[in-house]
Amino acid sequence: MSESNSLSFSKEPLVFGNSSFERKSKEHSTYAQSEILMDSYHRMTDQCFRKCVSSFVEPELGKGESACIDRCVKKYIETSLLLDERVRETEQANKKAALDIQNMKATVLGGMSSPSAAAPPIFFGQQPSTFDQQQQQQQQQQDHQQQQNNQPPQGRRGLGF
């Protein structure tokens, strides 16, 4: 039986950890990475060629053209490495921020009596949860008390002058 590049389906059950699905996923990831590298290489050669090669009189590169290409390739690679480093730093910072948020949520929810006491997010069209209703009632009571405190007592509305 010959190997082909197309996906094949097997009768093996899908088992995570050492599955053919995982192997194919890694192969796809490797293929995607090689495609990205090839694209980057083609862009680099195109840009450096356009920038550095101006004469087609000689069959070989001149010293100036060769030096220009060397500098161009060096800058391109250094810039790519710097960008990769910045992307990695940003990804790590985002992961840390997400972990910090999860820890804060766990801390806040950990103080409640049960996990069901946490209010789930309300999506469009859903009814407010009991927790939200209780908060609304408390706010209404506070507003009502504040309004009563701002009104003059019942018997003394005006002096009648």
Image: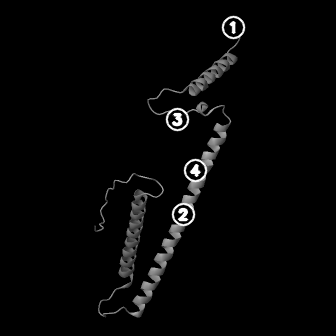
**Left or right: 23 as drawn, with respect to 86:** left
The answer to which quarter of the image holds residue 9 is bottom left
> Which disc is residue 121 wearing?
3
The answer to which quarter of the image holds residue 55 is bottom left
Q: Are marks 2 and 1 in contact (CB under 8 Å)?
A: no
Identify the residue position indicated by label 1 in the image: 154
Q: Secondary structure at mark 2?
A: helix
Where 18 falls versus 68 (above or below)?
above
Which coloring applies here?
one colour
| Residue type pointed to by label 3 | Pro
Badge 2: residue crowd in 10 Å (few <14, some 14–19, many ≥20): few
Q: Residue at x 63, y 18 (%)?
A: 144
Badge 1: residue crowd in 10 Å (few <14, some 14–19, many ≥20): few
Which of 86/155 is in front?
86
Disc nearer the start of the sequence (3/2): 2
**Left or right: 118 as drawn, with respect to 155:** left
Cα distance between the residues tagged 2 and 1: 69 Å
Disc nearer the start of the sequence (4/2): 2
| Residue type pointed to by label 1 | Gln
| Residue type pointed to by label 2 | Arg
Mark in front: 1 vs 4? 4
Q: Position of residue 58 (x, y in %)?
A: 31, 94
Identify the residue position indicated by label 2 in the image: 88
Q: Residue at x 39, y 63 (%)?
A: 28
Cα distance between the residues tagged 1 and 3: 44 Å
Identify the residue position indicated by label 4 in the image: 98
